[in-house]
Amino acid sequence: MSERYSVIYTKSALEDLRSIYSYIAGEYGDEDAAAKRVRKIRIAIRTLDMFPGRYPCHRDTSLHIMPAGHYRVIYAIDDEKKTAGIRRIFASRQNIGYLLKREQ
């Protein structure tokens, strides 16, 4: 059995989750739907504790991209520390390349 990794959120990733919640709650006036969406994203992220390398890296970077519904999670793996560091969470319609350049 493989060792479990710790999943760690950066401040940017936590702010992304708050922004997703605020957008859904504000745009659609539905705080329950906003909370449900954020909860689903966090549940998907929690699965990175086992085999975080199962999602591919983006082109020539060391950053992995995991789909989570209509969102994408950018994260880095540190095998020495056994961590999956969540860097950003964004809507799949956003420009991945631009966001990754900012994260490098």
Image (tube, rainbow, N blue to C red):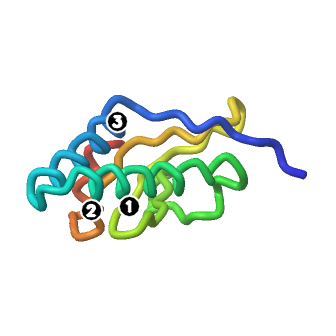
What is the x, y in percent for residue 52? 64, 53
Q: Which mark is residue 14?
A: 3
Residue closer to the observer: 67 or 60: 67
From the image, tell me which residue sits under label 2. 91
| Local SS, label 3 | helix
What is the x, y in percent for residue 81? 68, 29
Q: Which mark is residue 62?
A: none
Which residue is rendered at x = 17% and y = 51% of the image? 25
Cβ atoms at labels 1 and 2 below 8 Å apart: yes
Residue 33 visible, this angle: yes
Q: Which mark is residue 72?
A: 1
The amino acid at mark 2 is Ala
Question: Sequence order check: which comes first, mark 1 or mark 2?
Answer: 1
What is the x, y in percent for residue 46? 58, 48
The amino acid at mark 3 is Leu
Question: Sequence order check: which comes first, mark 3 or mark 1?
Answer: 3
Which residue is rendered at x = 26% and y = 44% of the image? 102
Residue 59 visible, this angle: no
Which residue is rendered at x = 42% and y = 52% of the image? 74
What is the x, y in percent for residue 56? 55, 65
